[in-house]
Amino acid sequence: MESSVSIRDLSLDFGSVKVLQSLDLEVAKGEFIVLLGPSGCGKSTLLNCIAGLLDVSEGQIFIGGKNVTWAEPKDRGIGMVFQSYALYPQMTVERNLSFGLRVSGMPKAEIEQRVNRAAEILQIQPLLGRKPANLSGGQRQRVAIGRALVRDVDVFLFDEPLSNLDAKLRSDLRVEIKRLHHRLKNTMIYVTHDQIEALTLADRIAIMKNGTIQQLADPHTIYNRPVNLYVAGFIGSPSMNFLEGTLNPANQTFVADDGTVVPVGTYAFETPVSGSTKAVLGVRPEHILIGEDAKSKPFTQEVEIEIVEPMGSDTLAWTKIAGKAVTFRCDSDVVITSGQKILIGFDPARGSIFNAETTNRI
Amino acid sequence: MAVDTLEPRGMRPRPFFTPRKIIIYSLLFFISVYYLFPMYVMIVTSLKSLDEARGGNIFALPIKVTFDPWFKAWDTACTGLYCEGLKVGFLNSMKITIPSVIVSVLIASINGYALVNWRFKGSEVFFVILLFGSFIPYQVMLYPLVIILRELHMFSTLQGVILIHTVFGMPILTLLFRNYFASLPPELFKAARVDGAGFWRIFIQIMVPMSLPIFVVAMILQITGIWNDFLFGVIFAGNQNYPMTVQLNNIVNSTQGVKEYNVNMAATILTGLVPLAVYFISGKWFVRGIAAGAVKG
């Protein structure tokens, strides 16, 4: 696969604070990459470095095979969309879209043609004569996307573009961005702290923490085979249930701290384990089954329901396994009430086991 | 008691005469009287003939209204050796104020913009030094400044006094602009850079159009400050360029002849007219600029 954006050994520090630490990232042409992480993890900083808005301390950035480490933002072949839209308030939508083209001294006819094409793609033709103050949040963000679009660049950078919008608009525009990507087939690098956005949009997700990439993989792998405890806990809502205990490879069991035994014979280990190891067993709420479905699973237990949260599409129930609070998800048609005793079970093959010391997946 | 049994519904009735309102309005009334009274005395005195002004009650309205003192103050009052009135000073003040305001606001706005958006190594230190300048009483620097201007061959010239006003306006104006530009979303600047705009284009096409209120605030501060200045004018401008304030002083404090109170009052009002007019015309903008976060942080 031809590489579109390539980041090699990139570091950035502000004084003694290391914001990015020798980071490597290869983005293929036409790929949709999401940088996901909590605030302060360096994801926006990384995006600003790619855009050329921040000078890097160490390492190189290549865009389209060209070393752009020292290049000006305008010479990098990127378009950028910001969380706060960053539209020029005193210019009309049309002037906003054409500003960059006018700066570069493009002929009027071509500017007009490009603006019209972008406006048509984003369905903002009726708004061209308005000022940003007279637009709704969703319209403003479309214009901001349009400003990147008219530049006709290879790489789009999105810095939390949907975070200022309300829930309904956010999911609408999310689909639209995906549609845009299908249509344009540009490389897109998208920063967000919203895991739903990440899982729905990305070809690959890079989970970041403290200026390093923890895991870079497709959404399915990230969700089902997280490489460490941090990724496992970060992705998924409600988050993964964790049981602490000891892994005994000899008899293929995981013994929780209170003595509860979970057979792990079905689990596919990343690396062979020798000797008993302190470990953490993680199971997603939707992988815990109830009633008849639970019976056939390697691990079953009768538990008492503590709290039931009906979510509409499904129902979330809280209980305890091995003294730990555990949530599980079941169909919304199933009637369960708090205080009820119920049989639950799961297959560790669908779960994840982590080394308690290194926090890495075993 | 039909009113008491009325069920609350819709807009709550607001009585006009509440104790709160009475206190606020009476306070406002007395404060305005306190400040407007000297103004009143000045105006009525300036409209009296000299005999009436010297003989009568200073609070009394003029028996016979005359504008002669105003004409005299403007046209023929003696300022030292010359008896050409304030009009010379007015012209000089204009010649000093207009370039000083334009140059200082221009430079300070670029300063503030560069300090916020184009941080360079040591820009913070530079800013601190600049701020430090505003805390030194400038009387301390008068003598060195005289020497410097002499060496630059600018002492007793219009350019000299303009330079002094520009330099001394720099700390507060730079602070003003820096804080305003810092309150604008930084993404705007980033977006403009991605669009390929450089230092000047971002400043002129993006920043300045968004900063009208703060430019007005800066202009008002500078116009009133420079117009009302006496010290720099008397020291650096030179005899032929004395601003209006200096000439006013020469009229009012002249030691020969009778004290023409009516002419003095008229001259004083004339001198104060420009800043007064500026406030009346642009007061709305001034408040808007202050409210826009120009003075916080």
Image (cartoon, coloured by chain):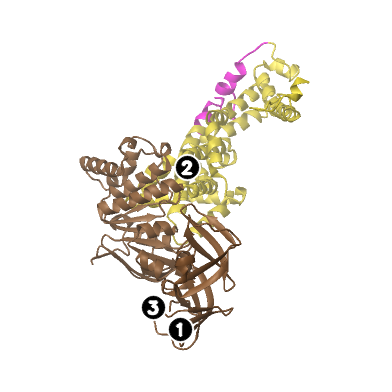
Chain colours: A brown, B yellow
Which residue is the extreme one toward the right? B1
Callout 3–callout 1 Cβ contact below 8 Å: no
Q: Amino acid at mark 1?
A: Gln
Q: Nearer the viewer, mark 2 or mark 1?
A: 1
Q: Is residue B72 magenta?
A: yes
Name the subunit of mark 2.
B
Q: Residues within 10 Å of mark 3 (few under 14, many from 20)?
A: some
List the residue tagged with mark 3. Answer: A268
Spatial CA distance of label 3 from label 1 is 11 Å
Spatial CA distance of label 2 from label 1 is 78 Å
The magenta stretch spans which residues? Answer: B64-92
Q: Give percent across and percent down for residue A205.
A: 37, 64
Q: Amino acid at mark 2?
A: Val
Asked if labels 2 and 1 share a chain, the reply is: no
Name the subunit of mark 1.
A
List the residue tagged with mark 1. Answer: A252
